[in-house]
Amino acid sequence: MATDSVDSEAREILQLLAQVMACFKRSGLEPPQGLREAAERADLGPRHVAPLLALSFEDELSVSELAERLGLSLPTTSQLVGELSRAGLLDRAEDDRDRRVTLVRIPADYRDAVQGLLLQQADPVRRTLERLSPRARADFLAGMRILAEESTGIEDG
């Protein structure tokens, strides 16, 4: 019986996640013009947004750290980094401490634009958290962390 309840709740969560993702995709958020033009010139798509948003939290990350944050394989992340770099939306450099490591960062010219896009995406998340009690927020975050951890084994999308 408990399994039926978990399966039912899992289905509901998947439906809700699909709804949330669909809303993010069709949100109509327009990236600032310079960012949009660079993406269009390089024929970049929605899959290139996640690396930019992940890097907007950091000064720089190694490609392997970025892959881990995104839950993607290293080859897939390397491909995304290469495409974003060719578009001028990422800078790549060797790590002075270990030349085998490639560090990536958002160039200063695009950092504000990417962070602005992140803040727009964060609005519904922020409003959701504001509606929850501190305890419910903590439980929600704990559940999301577990979901992210359990999702790591899923193939790249």
Image: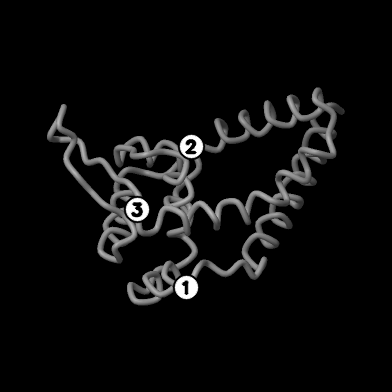
Q: Residue at x 50, y 42 (%)?
A: 154
* Callout 2 crowding tier (Cα within 10 Å): few <14, some 14–19, many ≥20: few
> Circle 3 is placed at which residue position?
108
User: Horizontal placement of 121 versus 36: left or right?
Assistant: right
Of pointers 3 and 1, the one earlier in the residue sequence: 1
Q: Are marks 3 and 1 in contact (CB under 8 Å)?
A: no
Q: Residue at x 39, y 58 (%)?
A: 110
Number of residue marks: 3
Of pointers 2 and 3, the one earlier in the residue sequence: 3
Q: Amino acid at mark 3?
A: Ala
Would you place residue 151 above or below residue 43 in this image?
A: above
What is the x, y in percent for residue 147? Answer: 62, 34
Of pointers 1 and 2, the one earlier in the residue sequence: 1
Nearest the eye: 1 or 125: 125
> Circle 2 is placed at which residue position?
153
Q: Disc 1 vs disc 2: which is toward the camera? A: 1
What is the x, y in percent for residue 53? Answer: 48, 50
Q: Amino acid at mark 2?
A: Gly
What number is the disc on residue 33? Answer: 1
Query: Which image quadrant for residue 141?
Result: top right
- Colour scheme of the rendered structure: one colour
